[in-house]
Image (tube, helix red, strand yellow):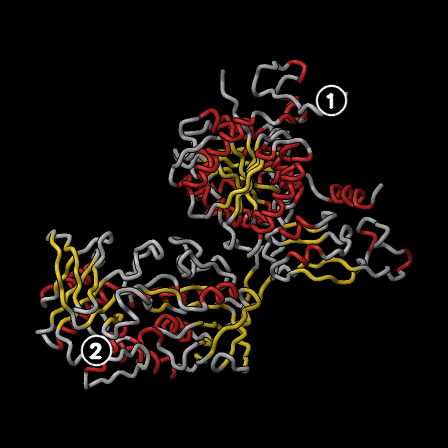
Amino acid sequence: MFPHAMHEMAQQHVAEQPRIGVFICHCGHNISAYLDVPALVESARGLPHVVLVQDSLFTCSDAGLSQIRTAVAERTLNRVVVASCTPRTHEPLFQATCEEAGLNRYLFEFVNIRDQCSWVHMQERERATQKATDLIRMGVAKAALLEPLEEAELVVQPAAAVIGAGMAGMTAALSLARRGFAVTLLEREREVGGLLRRLDRLYPTGASAQALVEHYAAEVGNQPHIEILTLAEVRGVSGHIGDYLLDVRLGAPGAHSRVSVPAGVIIVATGAEELKPAGRYGYGEDPRVITQQELEHLLSDDRLDQPARNTHDAPGITLHSVRSVLMIQCVGAREESRSYCGRTCCLTAMKNAILLKERDPKTEVHVLYRDIEVHGTHFEDYYAQARDTGIIFTRFSPAEPPQIDAGERRAIVFDELLGTRLGIPFDLLVLSTPMVPRPGSRELAQMLKVPVDEHGFFLEAHVKLRPLDFATDGVYLCGSAHWPAHLDETITQAYGAAARAATILSKDKIRASGVVAHVDEYLCRGCERCAGVCEYAAIDLVAFQAPRDPGTLPAGPLSFSPEGSPAPERLVARVNPVLCKGCGACSVVCPTDAMQAGSFTSRQITAMVQAALGD
Amino acid sequence: MEPFQPRIVAFACNWCSYAGADLAGVSRIQYPPTTRVIRVMCSGRVSPMFILEALRAGADGVLITGCHLGDCHYISGNEKALHNVDTARSLIKLLGIEPRRLRLEWISAAEGARFAKVISEFTEQVRGLGANPLRSLAVGNLHRETTVAGLSPADPARAGPPAFITAE
């Protein structure tokens, strides 16, 4: 007999017989109105290894969970199958229930008969019930083959790394520092402050942006738990939740100075920047065509009591001779190449228009818009205030954008509401552009192994249920790096991201997922194909170690040596359960089936395939 | 006569396509109940062996779904899936099985409607191809359906084995 067959027999002999409990949920009417639940119960009773089938109105309720715990004890179940909604929301709950009942949480299998059955086959009771019957048979077939899995313990470094020291990064850093955690705050520019360094005033209060950012910079500087590194750019990230290591370059690009920053968690707060619309409406050619940020530079420069510190965005003109200002909204936004709304540009335009009017009420200010985005209570009032100061708002259609006569400094626009073409002269043309992702965002995303969306902004784990998390554990997100945000949203998100990070930092140890690959060293030939496909460098080759007591395990010609003589050395794969993410790519390329993905083994999946077809 | 209802085995990855399938459910988008979904963590887990086994066991169609290229939660798992499905397709062609019974689709977590559409389209595609000729040879079907000898040749569900497989 081949060694691996003997091994298999021994395993089955050692393993206990599965005793499976199946719990079928009605989910109120969500399942029972569309599937014949009593028929599902009946057919589940006939499945191999099933000793108990129960149904309940809401399996996730206290009563439902209690039913499971009682059944595990009374019927000595060693596998639990729940047929209800979806594992993506409720698997952790049922796994925890199994643990409370004394079962390893990986001896649990979820069957989706709602989101992928009753809800999508509402008019076909018989065929939908047949599908649910098949799905339950598949779940039971897999459950019979499930094995208990161990969860590795990860020690958590009690420190956070915050990438970006704008308002988002500084708020998050302060929030964590005040809780007593050490924070390394990394900033790519020469000084902290981010986008607000380039602004003049803030909407809707008119408060000074510089005063606010100076205040935060001072707080951060005085906070003993925060270490600030400026001219610091992240060039590499390794490790995992609880134990990250950031490779940071210090100094200007091209500098050779590097430092390694350890962290238990990482917060991405890299923000966004204003789009410079080259080639649109004469921007880049005509010095009198500028962006809103460049206008803010002019406004603060013009104000004698607070000269502009900001050396960026300095156009080659002054406000001195400007009598009429034209603003165009949605430049580079809400169009085919960039479909989103910039969110902040309407209010920015109103803010700067009001400041122009306050500076000199005789200035003509005209805003050409497609739609006005002023949600909530304060912003609607702000819009009313802007109109009251004499700012004229004219609506145009994207099908007929304003035409600029550069020579005469005049805009021709078809007023949608008047139904007439207007000619509007201007001394200064200000283009309102959306925020766009900063250069280097995609590289940083790849270093962190987090996704970006189609526009290049960082993509959260779930838009509603996990808006500040990444699917990658231990990395969090806040501010305009996520989506162009108003300042209050940025600050709120920063508090939220810090809170999310603190749930990890406040623990000494956390448990990694047990769904990782493992090697049967008796089947492994050391061919290294698995290591070759692993994205996480989680597999290495080590010398096979014969077990100290060979009597407890089956013999094989390559591993057992009589009378304690050393076994011939051979290399076998070894998985680092902390680095392994459980994707299973290694299992596919293994020629001997030695490498298996926990809870997604070849035998389990094959059993499900066969069960699906009644084989 | 009742139309032939194909039996499709589908693999969906936890992070994208399985989530997309759930979204179709949350949105109550209806689609034919022809498919049995097997959840995997990554489309890259789907070995050509699973695909072959599904067809051997009598599946009329096999569908692999995963994240869009560039978006894989495990970086390149879907690229591995692409390669594995290509390998499987070459193998099934060699075996005389219609390669259009195998399909690979990228479906994101946000694409509930697209998941439903893919199921509907693939169902029709497989319906047009008729039953998997291996169905009658699969062990499980001997319990459920009549034996090969009792099959009516006119019935589209009983297509019979391909011409080059002769009975011994």
Which amino acid type is shown beneath numbered disc 2? Answer: Leu
Mark 2: secondary structure: helix
Q: In this view of the protein, can residue A200 be seen by the observer?
A: yes
Q: Tell me what residue is drawn at x 54 percent, y 74 percent.
A: A247
- Mark 1, chain letter? B
Q: Are marks 1 and 2 in contact (CB under 8 Å)?
A: no
Residue A103 in view: no
Rendered position, A531 above or below A142 = below
Separation of residues labelled 1 and 2 (CA atoms): 88 Å
User: Relative to residue A101, is residue A273 depicted above or below?
Assistant: below
Q: Which mark is residue A340?
A: none
Residue at the (60%, 31%) spot, across then down: B59
Q: Which residue is mark 2?
A: A299
Q: Position of residue B50 (x, y in %)?
A: 64, 40
| Residue under numbered circle 1 | B166
Mark 1 belongs to which amino acid?
Answer: Thr
- The residue depicted at 61 percent of the width and 40 percent of the height is A143
Label 2: few (<14), some (14–19) or many (≥20) C-alpha neighbours in 10 Å: many
Horizontal placement of A245 versus A596: left or right? left
Image quadrant holding the N terminus of chain A, namely: top right
Disc 2 chain ID: A
Q: Position of residue B6 (x, y in %)?
A: 54, 27
Height in image: A40 above or below A216? above
Q: Quadrant of the C terminus of chain A?
A: top right
Q: Nearer the viewer, residue B36 or A33?
A: B36
Label 1: state its secondary structure: loop
Is A614 displayed left or right of A12 in the figure?
A: left
Residue A224: image x %, image y %? 42, 82
**Residue B4 horizontal/vertical position (percent):** 52, 22
